[in-house]
Image: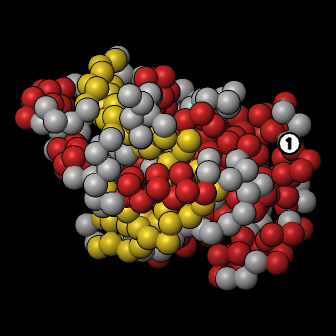
């Protein structure tokens, strides 16, 4: 029989964290789960840990698959090809879930006939924990502007996912953002759980946290998104929303990471790549209606940034902005 939900868990050199991840899935109150666990060419003993876990828990429907290392985007794509469940979920190998997550989310998806269900989550690192809320928001441009572009606090109806004509961008970080922003125009039925389920554990030694040169991948990813919107006729309808997302990424998330790159030449080059992409694609971005109507210090800061002071902001963020939750 078709499982209710398939959870895709990419694993690469995660021997110290993956057992907690799998324990949280074993504890789910929804037992009709398919766990697609992918050893993505690990060079430590992750595979042995996963094999022992499967032997220890024969009651779990674990499909342990091994492939050559190609990165998380390729691993997720490979995992999606194996899915047999009615719904799809994702969990990274250093994160973990609350027990009621998938039972409560699939129940909502069933009762309201939803394509996507979104939840809040816990943001954790060595300094503490806080709850990150997402939504509620509408579909279309409202979704694009307010979306928290991560996969793992959401579930997706498999039959809906199978209708999409794109996949994760191989070899790039920010594959979550690329996939979700390309998905946005197709989402017609979305629901929200006013409750956190996933513990997103930000490891200070993780690639995302420390290797700021990976920020350059965001340039390639956002070009993929823009090309997709152009080729599929969505660009004009979503122009203002896309523009605002570019502002947020290249003056916000990406900019903060770029400002912490140790090498000054690389730091400036990376910052200017994002700045130039924003200004070349959206030269009138300071007139963006979302930017002009939104309040808050972050949007005030966005409106202040210009070509003459961007490196000054980088210096301030590098030396004075606390790197915490």
Residue 98 relative to residue 256: left or right:
left
Q: In this rendering, is residue 83 above or below 325?
A: above
Q: Nearer the viewer, residue 321 or 172?
A: 172
- Residue displayed at 47% across by 56% down: 107
Q: Where is residue 186 in the image (x, y as percent from the top left)?
A: 74, 43
Observer-nearest residue: 147 or 191? 191
Callout 1: helix, strand or loop?
loop
Q: Name the residue under label 1.
A: 234
131 in relation to 102, above or below: below
Tell me residue 56's x, y (percent).
Answer: 7, 35
Q: Which colour scheme is used?
A: secondary structure
Along the horizontal axis of the image, is 38 left or right of 115? left
Task: Look at 9% across and 29% down and name the residue there.
Answer: 55
Where's the C terminus, which quadrant?
A: bottom left
- For the N terminus, the image quarter is top left
Residue 198 vs residue 195, the one in the foreground: 195
The percent position of residue 320, horizontal first and vertical second, equals 47, 76
Which residue is at a point 86% across and 66% down the rendered structure image? 288
Residue 22 at x, y = what percent? 23, 44
> Relative to 83, does residue 195 appear above or below in the rendering?
below
**In the foreground, 251 or 118:** 118
Instruction: Determine the image quadrant of residue 284.
Output: bottom right
Residue shown at 84% from the left, 46% from the top: 281
């Amino acid at each position: 029989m078709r499982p209710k939900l398939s959870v895709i868990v990419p694993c690469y050199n995660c021997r110290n964290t993956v057992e907690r991840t799998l324990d949280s899935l074993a504890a789910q109150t929804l037992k009709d789960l398919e766990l697609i666990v992918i050893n993505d060419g690990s060079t430590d003993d992750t595979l042995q840990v996963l094999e022992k876990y499967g032997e220890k828990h024969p009651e779990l429907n674990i499909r342990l698959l091994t492939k050559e290392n190609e990165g998380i985007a390729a691993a997720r794509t490979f995992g999606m090809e194996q899915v047999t469940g009615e719904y799809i979920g994702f969990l990274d190998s250093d994160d973990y879930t609350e027990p009621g997550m998938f039972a409560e989310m699939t129940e909502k998806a069933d009762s309201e006939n939803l394509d996507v269900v979104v939840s809040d989550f816990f943001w954790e690192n060595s300094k503490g924990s806080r709850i990150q809320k997402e939504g509620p928001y509408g579909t279309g441009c409202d979704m694009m502007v307010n979306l928290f572009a991560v996969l793992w606090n959401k579930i997706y109806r498999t039959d809906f996912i199978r209708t999409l004509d794109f996949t994760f961008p191989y070899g790039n970080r920010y594959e979550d953002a690329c996939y979700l922003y390309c998905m946005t125009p197709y989402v017609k039925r979305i629901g929200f759980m006013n409750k956190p389920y996933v513990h997103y554990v930000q490891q200070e030694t993780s690639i995302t946290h420390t290797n700021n040169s990976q920020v350059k991948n965001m340039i390639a990813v956002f070009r993929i998104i823009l090309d997709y919107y152009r080729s599929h006729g969505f660009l004009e309808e979503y122009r203002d929303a896309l523009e605002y997302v570019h502002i947020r990424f290249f003056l916000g998330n990406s900019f903060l990471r770029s400002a912490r790159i140790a090498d000054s030449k690389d730091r400036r080059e990376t910052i200017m790549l994002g700045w130039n992409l924003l200004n070349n694609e959206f030269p009138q971005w300071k007139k963006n209606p979302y930017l002009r109507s939104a309040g808050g210090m972050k949007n005030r800061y966005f409106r202040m940034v210009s070509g003459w002071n961007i490196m000054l902001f980088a210096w301030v963020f590098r030396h004075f902005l606390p790197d915490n939750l």
